[in-house]
Each structure stands twice: as C-alpha cells, then as structure tokens.
Image: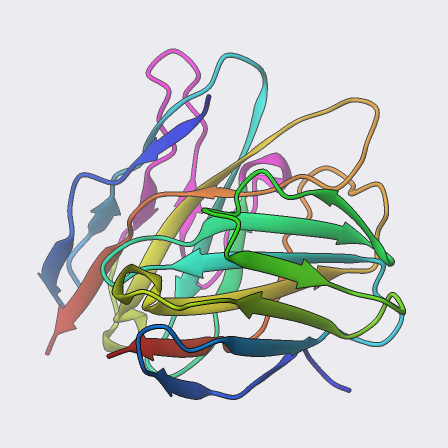
Amino acid sequence: GAGVSQSPRYKVAKRGQDVALRCDPISGHVSLFWYQQALGQGPEFLTYFQNEAQLDKSGLPSDRFFAERPEGSVSTLKIQRTQQEDSAVYLCASSSYRNVPRGYGYTFGSGTRLTVV
Amino acid sequence: AQRVTQPEKLLSVFKGAPVELKCNYSYSGSPELFWYVQYSRQRLQLLLRHISRESIKGFTADLNKGETSFHLKKPFAQEEDSAMYYCALSPLISSGSARQLTFGSGTQLTVLP
C-alpha cells in the first residue's frame, strides 16, 4: 500500500470488553511501532517490532495490553478488559530500516480512536 | 529518562506575523530533535529535523544544546500553517537500531486572517 493503514478508524467499546486494533505497515517495512495518544497529549511509545520479533515492550501500560506481529507484516494491538483510561488514539508507525539512520522520521498511520464507555 | 516540553498549548498569530513555537528538552545523552505536524484530519507527518538544518515550508529550527531548546520559527505565518505541532526527541545511538520518539504535548497554532 501507499502508506501505513490502520483499522478500524473508530472503535467504541464497553468497559470490560476486549478490543483488537490492526496495523498494516508499508510493504517490506522492517520496523513497526505502536504509540498511544491520549486527548491533549503527544503520542507515547508502547512497543516496537523488528520483523516478527517484539524487541521492546517497555511502554505497554499494563498486562492487559498485548501486541503481536506473527509474520513480520501486519500487527495487532490487543487490549483486554478495557478501562476508561484506555480511551485514546492508537498510532502505528513503520520504517524500512532495521538500523535507523540519523534524522529519520517514521511514517505514521492515521490511527484508531478508541473510546471506552 | 528523556522529556520534551512544549509550554504553549495554544498559539494564535495574525497572517504575516512571525511565529515561534517553543520546545525544550531534557536528555542526558546526544539527542536528535524533530518537529512533526498534524493538519486537520490528516496524519502525523515529519516537518523537519535538526540534523539536516533544512527549511521546510518556511519553517526553521535550531538546536541549542546550551539552552536545551529546539524552537520552531517562521518569519511570516500563513493561514495554511494552522495545525498541531509536536516537538519530538530520539536518542542518538551510534550502533544503530530503531529508536523510539518521545513527544511533547503539542502546540495548536492558529493563523488568523
């Protein structure tokens, strides 16, 4: 595809419901990031994949958050037993580089806006 | 730990006036600094980066290591510059590897006619 694609664009979940958010990176991109952007805040790092390997998950806020990228392309961010504080825009970004050169800015998707009611 | 501070949540200027969006950072190592922009109903996109010392859409930003600042400036603002602007920091790791970005909370710039 031409860019990073995320689905769904909007998701409303009842508190306690499980959700799955999908990211289709640019074809062939090695590196994939997930960020969480709460209302009025900048994006915050959640996790990073290099191909299928999850190399950094230090930003995941709790064990209710789980991400996978089993075949090194599409990635899914799953949130179990959603809480109101999970309401945010979830952004995916990808890069063709394994070792990112200086000055490189990632390509971001449009995000999934999750609202937990 | 690294931190990026954008002290102004909202900034309004008139068309043709100079504009400066402030960004301060804290980081113990050598950082890379970026400005990202998000126009209404569009995705987050890279505006410029300190390493290339470039001017994009008339915007410039100089990394001031002494003041730990990376303010974004434009001498004559245009209405199409109205957008949300985020300053971001990435650690510079000589051995390479993907590097996460730490973002500020953003400044909403409105350029009035």
Q: How many marks?
A: 0
Q: Quadrant of residue B52?
A: top right
The residue located at (27%, 52%) in the rendering is B75
Question: How was the colour assigned to the protein in this rendering?
Answer: rainbow
Predominant secondary structure, magenta span: loop
Q: Nearer the viewer, residue B16 or A77?
A: A77
The residue located at (37%, 20%) in the rendering is B68
Is residue B68 depicted above or below B77 in this figure?
above
**In magenta segment, residue B55:** yes
Q: In this view of the protein, can residue B15 be seen by the observer?
A: no
Q: Give coordinates of residue A13: x percent, y percent.
A: 36, 83
Q: Nearer the viewer, residue B22 or A87?
A: A87
Q: In this view of the protein, can residue B10 be seen by the observer?
A: yes
The residue located at (49%, 67%) in the rendering is A80
Query: Is A104 placed left or right of B19 in the picture?
Result: right
Q: Give coordinates of residue B71: x percent, y percent.
A: 33, 37
Indicate the quadrant containing the N terminus of chain A: top left, top right, bottom left or bottom right: bottom right
Q: Give coordinates of residue A33: x percent, y percent.
A: 65, 56
Indicate the quadrant containing the C terminus of chain A: top left, top right, bottom left or bottom right: bottom left
**In magenta segment, residue A58:** no
Q: Nearer the viewer, residue B50 or A82?
A: A82
Instruction: Give the magenta-colored segment's residue range.
Output: B50-75
Is residue B111 depicted above or below B3 in this figure?
below
